[in-house]
Structures are given as C-alpha cells and as structure tokens.
Image (cartoon, rainbow, N blue to C red):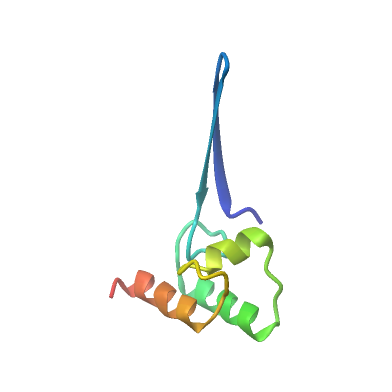
C-alpha cells in the first residue's frame, strides 16, 4: 500500500520530484475516514505494524510518535471540528 503520490518532472539539467503524503490517511484510501482512526488504533495497540509511509501518514501532529493525539486530530479532520 503506497500512501505517497509522486510526480516527477524532468527538463534538460533539471529534475523536480514532488511527494505528497496523505496525512491522516494511513489506509491509503484517498480520503480520511473512520477506517483511518481504526488503523491508527491498531498501530497504537500493536495489532498492526505500519510501513514507514503509513507511520508518516498516521503521525499527523509530526511529533515522531503515533498516539491518541493523532487519533484526535484525525477525528477533527473527519468531523471538521
């Protein structure tokens, strides 16, 4: 499962690579949903092992850890609170 969208543009002597991580969407579905909260919960409880891309997508507050704070932010994204 790839949570990164990559666009690569090339011109003579120039290479531009753009990476877009789908923060809050470790399932890689393209939309942040309740399924992402459940996925993050599984990471926290150790019942799922995230790939590095999934961990980056799940760590929405960028503190280097996947925890309850990330779940709360994802909830706010979903419910726009």
Which is more toward the observer, 16 or 1? 16
**Where residue 17 sits: x, y (%)?**
55, 35
Instruction: Please tell me in which quadrant of the rendered image residue 7 appears.
Output: top right
**Where residue 24 sits: x, y (%)?**
48, 66
Q: Residue furthest top?
A: 12
Q: Is residue 27 visible?
A: no
Q: Residue at x 70, y 76 (%)?
A: 48
Picture mark count: 0
Apparent side of residue 45 relative to residue 75 in the rendered image (left or right): right
- Picture quarter with the C terminus: bottom left
Q: Residue at x 70, y 82 (%)?
A: 47
**Where residue 69 sits: x, y (%)?**
46, 80
Q: Residue furthest bottom?
A: 45
Examine the rendered structure and indicate whether residue 35 appears above or below residue 10.
below
Q: Residue furthest front?
A: 63
Q: Is residue 16 visible?
A: yes
Q: Residue at x 62, y 82 (%)?
A: 44
Examine the rendered structure and indicate whether residue 51 appears above or below residue 71.
above
**Where residue 59 sits: x, y (%)?**
53, 68
Examine the rendered structure and indicate whether residue 25 appears above or below residue 17.
below
Instruction: Please tell me in which quadrant of the rendered image residue 77 appears.
Output: bottom left
- Picture quarter with the N terminus: bottom right
Q: Residue at x 37, y 71 (%)?
A: 78
């Amino acid at each position: 499962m790839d949570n990164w969208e990559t666009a690569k543009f090339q011109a003579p002597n120039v290479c531009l690579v753009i990476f877009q991580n789908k923060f809050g969407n470790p399932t890689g579905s393209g939309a942040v949903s309740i399924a992402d909260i459940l996925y993050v919960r599984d990471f926290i409880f150790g019942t799922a092992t995230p790939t590095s891309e999934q961990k980056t997508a799940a760590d929405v507050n960028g503190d280097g850890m996947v925890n309850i704070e990330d779940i709360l932010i994802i909830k706010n994204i979903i419910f726009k609170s």
